[in-house]
Image (cartoon, rainbow, N blue to C red):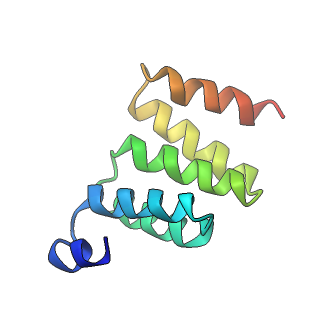
Amino acid sequence: MQAALKLKSNSAIIHNNLGSVYISMENFNAAIQEYTQAIRLNPSYSEAYYNRAIAYYRIGNMNQAISDMQTAINLNPNDLEMKNFYKKIAYL
């Protein structure tokens, strides 16, 4: 994945996917950095906000997780998975 970033470091999708790799390795801070880069490259990328919310949730930063989920849902209001995760974290 790092090789892919060297080839196309301006790709929000690649940064989002690398963030997901870091999540699977439980390296949540690195995941947050990658998702943040994806969002910088594409501010309307709802999946990156959703994924970053999951990472924030996993490190216990509920305020940021909720904020990212609200943004993700605003960008993609028909995504039921996002809405369900938001309900899970917003009402803890």
Judge by depth and name the residue closer to the eye, 20 or 84.
20
Q: Is residue 21 above or below residue 67?
A: below
Percent of width and height locating residue 79 = 44, 23
Q: Position of 28 compared to 33: left or right?
A: right
Q: Position of 59 compared to 84: left or right?
A: right
Residue with the most extreme left position = 7
Q: Is residue 37 above or below residue 92?
A: below
Q: Residue at x 28, y 55 (%)?
A: 13
Can residue 41 be seen here? The reply is no
Q: Position of 89 compared to 40: left or right?
A: right
Percent of width and height locating residue 67 = 61, 46
Q: How many marks?
A: 0
Q: Is residue 46 above or below residue 5?
A: above
Q: Residue at x 40, y 41 (%)?
A: 46
Can residue 66 be seen here? The reply is yes
- The quadrant holding residue 66 is top right
Q: Residue at x 49, y 70 (%)?
A: 33
Percent of width and height locating residue 38 = 35, 60
Q: Residue at x 73, y 61 (%)?
A: 59
- The quadrant holding residue 42 is bottom left
Quadrant holding the N terminus:
bottom left
- The quadrant holding residue 9 is bottom left
Judge by depth and name the residue closer to the eye, 5 or 72.
5
Percent of width and height locating residue 78 = 42, 19
Quadrant holding the C terminus:
top right
Residue with the most extreme right position = 92
